[in-house]
Every structure is written in C-alpha cells, then in structure tokens.
Amino acid sequence: MRAFHLKDAPLVLLSLVFFIWGLITVSSNSLIPYYKDAFALDYKMAMLFPMAFFITRVTVSLPTSFVMAKFGYRTTMKYCLCWCLLGCLAMAYLVRTESLYPTLLGILLMASGISAIQVVSSPYVSLLSTPDKSVIRQSIATAANSVGTVLGPLALTAIIVAATTLGFADTSFHVSILFLLITSFFFGLLVFFSKVDLPDIKPKQVSGFWRGLFCLLGNREFMTLATVLLLYIGVEVSFGTFTITYLADGSYGGFGLIQATQFIAAYWVGMFLGRLLFAKFGHWVNRHGLFSFACVVAILISLTALFEQASWVGFLLLLVGLCNATLYPIIYARALQASGKHSSQGAAILIMCSIGGVMLPFAQATLIDEFSLSISYIVPVIAYLAMTILYWSSLNKHDKP
C-alpha cells in the first residue's frame, strides 16, 4: 500500500490519537453532573461513572503491554484503534437504553479501548525520537491532547444546545450523537494509519515480560514518579469535574450547568497554552523548579476555594489548568526514562496510575456529601503537597540543582 508522505507523519498520527482520547476523557468527566441528575444520584454514587472509565486502566493496561512487548508497537496500535472504534459504537448504542447499568457497561467497553491506545501511544511518542527530544515530543502530543480537552466540553454543549433546539432534550440522545461522531473520527484514524509509514518498535528486554515487570516494581525512582503521576491525574480529574459543579451551584458560581460546562473549557485552554509554551521553551527552564512552582500556585488556589465562596473563586479555579500544564510531560518523561529497558511494562504501570482519576475525586465527592463543596478542596491541597515532596525525593543527587 502506498505510504502517505508527510513531514513527521508518525508524530501527526500519534498527536491525533492524543487529541481524541483527551476529548473523550474530558467529555466523559463533563458528563458526570448530567448523569448525576439523569439517574438521581448523590455525589459518591455519581463517581460510578469515572470509576467505570478509569478502572479499565488497571484491567487493560498490563494485557496490552504484554501484547505490545510480543508483537511491537505498530501492530498493537492497529488493533487498539479497531477496539476504540467498536467500543465507542457500543457506547453510542447502550446509552440509548437510558438505564444505569447498560450505560456503565458502555463506558467500560469504550474506555477499555481508550486505555489500550494510551498504553501504546504514550511511550511510542517518546521512543520515536532521541532521548534529549522525548520531553519536547511528549509536550507536543500532550498539547494536542489539550486541544481535545478544550473542544470536549464545547462539543458537548454544542450538541446539547443543537439537539434541544431540535426537540431532543434527553441526555442519552446527546451522548449517543457525541460517540457516533467520535466513532467516525476513529475510522478516519484507521485510514490515516494505513497510509502512514509508521516505524515499528519492539521493546528490547533482557528478561521476560513478567520478570521485567517485577524488576520495575522494585525500582524506587520509577515507582515514586508513578505515585506522583497517580496524584496528578487525580487532581486533574477533580478540577475538571468539580469546577463545573462549583460554577453551576447556586451557592457558589450560580451560572447553571450548561454555561458552567462551557466555562470549563477555559481550564483546558490554560493547560493547552501551558503545554504549547513548554514544548517551545521547556529546554530553557529548570524543570524541577517549574514543577514545584506550579504545585505551590495550585495549592494557594485550592486554599482560596477552601476558605472563600464566590463566583470569582470559580474562575480562579480554572487557572489551575495552567498550573497542571507542565506537570504531566515532566512526570511522564522522567518516569519512562527511569523504566529503562522495561518501557512496555513502564507504560502499562503509568497508564494504570490513571486510577487516581477515581480515588481523589471519590475522596472529594465524599467530603462534598458529608460537609460541603468548599471543604472538599482540602483534598487537592494535600495531593499537590504530596506530589512536590515525592517528586523531589525521586531525584538523584546529580539531578538536583
């Protein structure tokens, strides 16, 4: 088959993969308040939806990593793209039942494909370049991911407004349309994949897969960074979810659910701009210092939300996206480098760290139900503080300034 010639076409393809999983992840997070109202759930029960989404990171990551180690990145990516297409199609169908458990099943099927494609594409971006450029390429790909996270809430609200105008007011129809459009995007990615001359990589491992996995679990630096990533994903999802709640709630922002969903795009815009700037100028700054600065600012904003209740605080919370912008590429690139020759196992473990996207939001949801939304912001305060301490503890003496 004739290859499609484009400068750095593999990076374009992988960036599109990053884009669509960002759009899906944020759209799924943004739908939680809608699911909560549709199924009359409290905040803790509403966490079933992100739990169904992120639990697949644990169940799917290791099997995908094993297949990737055996057959290589390119072949695994092809199967994962097919999986994503079928999973999104299943989600579009099952959500139309307007029942809780079929909807959760649809999320599981859809999210399992997204988890699998993340296991492949995250290290693929870095491994297709020299080590000194891996952070920059990771930043470019995550910037594309951020574009998806910006467009996710906007696409969702556009579908809701358009469908409601046409007389389709039920949430299930809106979600179904969204995932049918995403299915068509994955079809386009499969066509692009077939035309791109994508270099294949098979992880070079001295030991067997499982031996390498246990070896990596004993790597203190890697596991510390994996814990930092788990906490990061938790706070990213928490802010992406509960800032909508803050802006929508009459006691806080008072803007209503649809307008609050539109506002949350600013959170992801900040993340996009930050990653774009980091991709351009990241080699000029001290990454350790930048990491700490971002965490400190996020802590101060979270403390403000803890003690103040006003609409301006909701907009201040949106600025946390700018703080989070550089954290993921810094953590991921360092962790993948620490995994050494066990990159496929490392990728699986790092994707499994997405379970933080359930743990921290669940803790915050529990505090909301038991106390209040403002009190719940003690969770990100503790998380960012722990991230800073763990990150610096992971550095070797020669890494520290």
Image (cartoon, grey):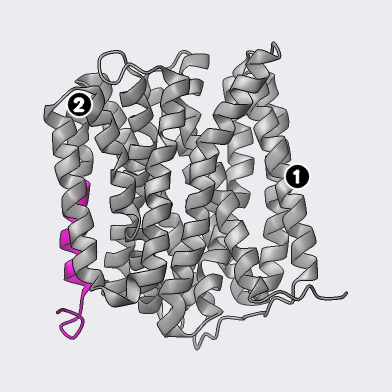
Place residue 390 in its image quadrant. bottom left
Q: How many marks?
A: 2
**Overall secondary structure of the magenta section:** helix
Numbered range of the magenta stretch: 383-401
Tag 2: residue type?
A: Ser
Q: Tag 1, which secondary structure?
A: helix
Give residue 10's position: percent from left, percent from top: 64, 72
From what the image shows, is residue 369 above or below residue 84?
Answer: above
Residue drawn at 14 percent across, 26 percent down = 308
List the residue tagged with mark 2. Answer: 374
Q: Is residue 356 visible?
A: no
Tag 1: residue type?
A: Ser
Which quarter shows the N terminus? bottom right
From what the image shows, is residue 371 above or below residue 381?
Answer: above
Residue drawn at 64 percent across, 34 percent down = 106
Q: Which of marks 1 and 2 precedes in the sequence? A: 1
Residue 60 lies in magenta, yes or no? no
Place residue 370 in its image quadrant. top left
Verify CB contact (< 8 Å) between mark 2 and mark 1. no
Give residue 139's position: percent from left, percent from top: 44, 66
Alpha-carbon span between mark 2 and mark 1: 40 Å
The residue furthest right is: 1
Residue drawn at 18 percent across, 68 percent down = 289
Front-most of 66 and 19?
Answer: 19
Q: Classify 10 Å Cα crowding around label 1: few (below 14), some (14-19), many (20 and above).
A: some
List the residue tagged with mark 1. Answer: 184
Q: Is residue 265 visible?
A: yes
